[in-house]
Every structure is written in C-alpha cells, then in structure tokens.
Image (cartoon, grey):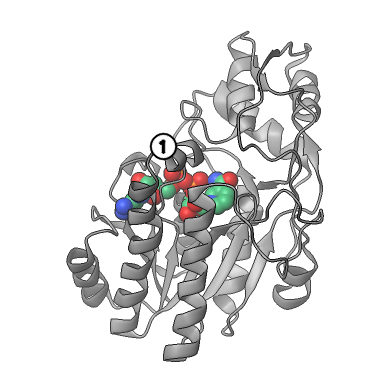
Amino acid sequence: MRVLVTGGAGFIGSHLADALLARGDDVIVVDDLSAGRVARLDPQLTLHKVSITDAGALTAVVRASRPDLICHLAAQIDVRASVDFPAADAQVNVVGTVNVLEAARSVGARVLFASSGGALYGRDAPIPSREDVLPLPESPYGIAKYCAEQYIGLYNRLHGTSHSVLRLANVYGPRQDPAGDAGVITIFCASALAGGTPTIYGDGAQTRDYVHVGDTVNAFLAAADRGRPGTWNIGTGVEVSVLDLVAIIGDIGGRPLTPRFAHTRPGELLRSAVAVDRPASELGWRALTPLADGVRGVYHWIEAGAPDRAAC
Ligand SMILES: NC(=O)c1ccc[n+]([C@@H]2O[C@H](COP(=O)([O-])OP(=O)(O)OC[C@H]3O[C@@H](n4cnc5c(N)ncnc54)[C@H](O)[C@@H]3O)[C@@H](O)[C@H]2O)c1
C-alpha cells in the first residue's frame, strides 16, 4: 500500500510511519513541523513540510503521491491552547481535516482519522465509555475532533467512502515530548530521573485510560487492513489514577516519588476510560502492553537521553 501519514513527524505518527515501512508499505509524511521533528523519521521516508491548513499545497502533495490510504494524525493537540485560541484550534483540527478529506477525495484514498477518546465523552458518560454514547466534549479541542468525525461520517454517506475513526485514549510511550505538557507519564518519569517534584493538579484520584503507543500503532494497522468504515475506541478499558502512576514510577526508579499538589485545573475530567469490546470484535485488536512494562520503557528511554528514533 502507499500510505500518507499526516502528522508523521509527531509522537504517534512517527511510530506509525516506522511500522508501515517495516511491513513493506510505501510511506509519505506530511507535517508542518510545528511540533514534529525530522529526527524522529526514518531517513528513507519522504517528508513534505506542508500545513494541512494549506489546501492547495496539501492537494498537490496528495495528487503527486497518490496514496491508497491517508492516516490523518496532524493536529493541534494542546487542550488548554484550544480553550485560549479556539479559532486557531478549529482552523487546524476542523478545516485542516476537511482539507485532508478533499485531497483524499481527489485521488480516491481512504482516510483513518486519529480522534480522541479522552476529550469526546463528557463528564456524565458511563465509564468505560462506549462509542455509541453521545459525545459532550468539555473543550474546543474535543468539539473540533467531534466535528471532524461528523465530516468523516458525512463523506461516507455523501461520497460512498470508507473512512474510519480511531478514538485514542491517553497514548504514552517513547518519543512523547518530555518538554511539552502532553503526557503525564513522560513528565513524571522525567521528573523522577531529575530528582524533581512532579505537580499533581487536584488530589491525584482522577483517572485516565493509558494505552501504549505500540498498541495504538497496531490498532491503525488493523484498521488499515479492514476495508469497511467504523469508529473504534483505542484504549485498555482500565482506569488508572495519577497516584497509581506515581507509585508505579517510584517502584521503577527504586525510590518513592513525592508529588506536590496544586489546584485542580478548570474543565479537567475526574474520570475517563473507554470501552474496548468493539475494536476487539471488529478489528481483532486489543491493547497488550502491561502498564508497568510500558512505563518502564518510557523511564529507560528518558534515562538514555530521550533519543528521537527510540523504538516502541
Ligand atoms: N497522544 C495522545 O494521547 C492522543 C490522544 C488522543 C488523540 N490523539 C491524536 O493523535 C494525533 C497525534 O498526536 P500526538 O500525540 O502524536 O501529537 P504530536 O503533536 O506529537 O503530533 C502531531 C503532529 O502534527 C503536526 N502538525 C500540527 N499541526 C499541523 C498542521 N497544521 N499541518 C501539518 N502538520 C501539523 C505536528 O508538527 C506534529 O508532528 C493527533 O491527532 C491527536 O489529536 C493523541
């Protein structure tokens, strides 16, 4: 297959590009490098430094490379930035996705879209949240992802396409930016190694569903091989609290991690986990990496200097 990965120089996208290459696919990467890094990419990959907000440039790349499949991961991923700058968020996450869908339409490519399992389901959704719960996002980022999903559903009805949606829970693993503020596992591992004091917002009882990037990549591969459209939660179904993470990282580092507590951040969900029976039955996929093993991998990756080309 010829596969174009938008956001392919990012954390998840670069692992996905590696996995596609490893199974013999032709891979093309589109990334504006706003958060991505060239050093994450296998040197044999072709990178087009293009923004998905530039419809003309994007369509030119897609027409020239004629992919069978577009894995669409390029996004503005900072939830708090989406609250401060909702129009800028929508420009990338909504309009950018429409541009990807139009470019895909011009060559008949199928699209797999990286949506969010953590930001879509509202605070009253049953836990673990199933795909058929009505989304009630708590942020412009969540609204934009939901809106983009609606466009995908519309394109399938209007144009007979087979685009699909993967609602990713909290993905973690090597290459997640330890300097950024996406990824509590990376941040806490970095803090533990530096002998620092990680900050917990709230009492630490808030839960998330942490899914390893290797498992996440396998979900994309499974969805790529399934021709029919669908919407799948990609997570573990297990709630893990911030305090659980602190304990796991303390065990790995051989000394307890002592956090500092700060005020809860407005809009933060108290609980989140996604139901995973649908991807199991429809894609034959489930997360396989035990949390402690995955966190140990992140810890050792940071200990090794957080190399850009670390495997997952
Ligand atoms: N990491 C998670 O836990 C998580 C959870 C749910 C959903 N997702 C989704 O998965 C996808 C990948 O996330 P990630 O964690 O790898 O983030 P990331 O920031 O590492 O990757 C996103 C990539 O998109 C690129 N990008 C941003 N704006 C662009 C634009 N206008 N044009 C072209 N490229 C652009 C960035 O440079 C970056 O390389 C995103 O769509 C994100 O919303 C991630």
Quadrant housing the C terminus: top right
Q: Quadrant of residue 231?
A: bottom right
Is residue 163 something one can see in this rendering?
no
Indicate the amino acid at tag 1: Asp
Q: Residue at x 80, y 23 (%)?
A: 247
Where residue 199 appears, as percent x and y from the top left, is: 64, 17
Which quarter of the figure has residue 95? bottom left
Location of residue 73 with respect to 193 vertically, above or below: below
Residue furthest top as drawn? 195
Q: Nearer the viewer, residue 119 or 255?
A: 119
Query: Which percent across, then down, holds residue 126?
Result: 81, 56
Q: Nearer the viewer, residue 82 or 244?
A: 82
Image point 27% across, 72% down: which residue? 62
The residue shown at (28%, 49%) is: 32
Q: How many marks?
A: 1
Residue 277 sits in quarter:
bottom right
In the picture, the quarter occupied by the N terminus is bottom left
Using residue 175 as the reference point, say whether residue 50 is left or right of it.
left
**Left or right: residue 276 compared with residue 55:** right
Give the residue pinned by disc 1.
84
Q: Residue at x 51, y 56 (%)?
A: 143
Q: Position of residue 112 (x, y in %)?
A: 50, 70
Residue 250, given in percent of the width and then of the height, sits at 76, 18
Is 35 in front, or is 148? Answer: 148
Label 1: element kind = helix
